[in-house]
Image (tube, helix red, strand yellow):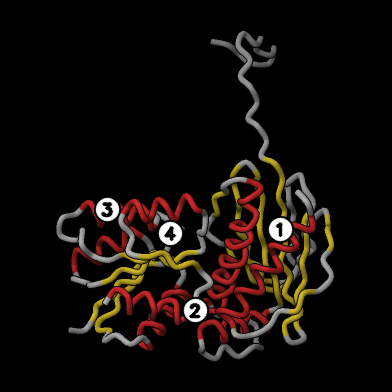
Amino acid sequence: MPLDVLIVDDSAAIRKILQRVLRQADVDVGQVYEAGDGLEALETLKKHKVHLVLADVNMPNMNGLQLLAQIKANAEWASLPVIMVTTEGSQSKVMEAAQLGAAGYIRKPFSAEQIKDKLANLF
Amino acid sequence: MDTDRIVQAVAAATGEVFSTMLATEAVLGEPYTERMPNVSDGVVAFIGLAGKWTGTGMISCPPSLACRLASQLLMTEYPPGGEAVSEDVLDAVAEIANMIVGNVKNLLEEELGPMGMSIPTVIFGRNFTTRSVGQGDWVVVPFDCEGEKLEVRVCLAPAREPAPVRHGFQAPDYVELR
């Protein structure tokens, strides 16, 4: 079954790069949705069922950690894997993401291989 | 804050971003300091940093280099030349700044404590004036990118403590009390 993915990042550049990397990975990627912040992501999740979320941490309106907390607090989405893809590398943020239930934490700059490896481990 | 430590962090962060995401090399030039950022043309992206130390990280480059870096990052051709720099190019430069300044922050946090980062702001223009009301000097780290210059600037100073509340302070005469 193809993997539907939601990419959440306020940078259109990063959304474009992640789309490209996903298409090159050894997994069957289906629909890829995009959101510019956590609030937009929640609206997208209400309309579309996805199998994976890739989310930045530093975003306007609702940041990635707040989004992660909202996803894990919702019974319908709680099992959805969320991978944080972010410049934010402080230990406290990594720990917070892990405690909130993130399925992975990839620091920018990232290589395509890091994303592919993470996907291979999850699916 | 030791200037050499900032230069070291900028060199490491910029090198990593260029080799991992841009598949090109940025050759470190001769770093220097300046009181005010001497930037008046081109594409400039800056990001605020706040914690026990506060300041700004900034990258600047000519539009032709911005187009080349965007082409490398997004694997799409953005030809240089002409008056305009497209939104895609500005967004790419903002993201490059985000990754460089973010990683400088990550490296300096070991000594300076946790810092928050603002969302990047990017400007493209000519003959603009840059002013800074910060207290510290700017550390400027230039890089040569295949004949064009990218500059990374960082200005950091200890955060000012908020003024203590002085109970019983006499209101000045010119304040009308009702």
- Residues at marks 3 and 4, common chain? yes
Disc 2: which chain?
A
Q: Gap in Å between the C-alphas at discs 4 and 1? A: 22 Å
User: Which residue corresponds to mark 3?
Assistant: A70
| Mark 4 element type | loop
Specify whether disc 2 shares its chain with disc 3.
yes
Q: Which residue is mark 1?
A: B154
User: Can you give x and y, in whole percent of width and height, for residue B7 in the image?
Assistant: 75, 62
Q: Which residue is mark 2?
A: A111
Disc nearest the viewer among 2 and 4 = 2
Where is residue B124, by image quadrant? bottom right
* Kind of residue indicated by mark 4: Val
Asked if residue B33 is positioned above or below residue B166 in the image, the reply reads below
Q: Quadrant of residue B130?
A: bottom right
Among numbered discs 2 and 4, the one appearing first in the sequence: 4
From mark 3 to mark 1, how far is it between C-alphas? 35 Å
Residue density around tag 1, few if under 14, some if 14–19, many if 20 or more, within 10 Å:
many
Q: Nearer the viewer, residue A122 or A17?
A: A122
Dot 3 amino acid type:
Gln
Residues marked 3 and 1, same chain: no
Give the amino acid at mark 2. Answer: Ser
Q: To which residue does mark 4 refer?
A: A57
Q: Residues within 10 Å of mark 3 (few under 14, many from 20)?
A: some
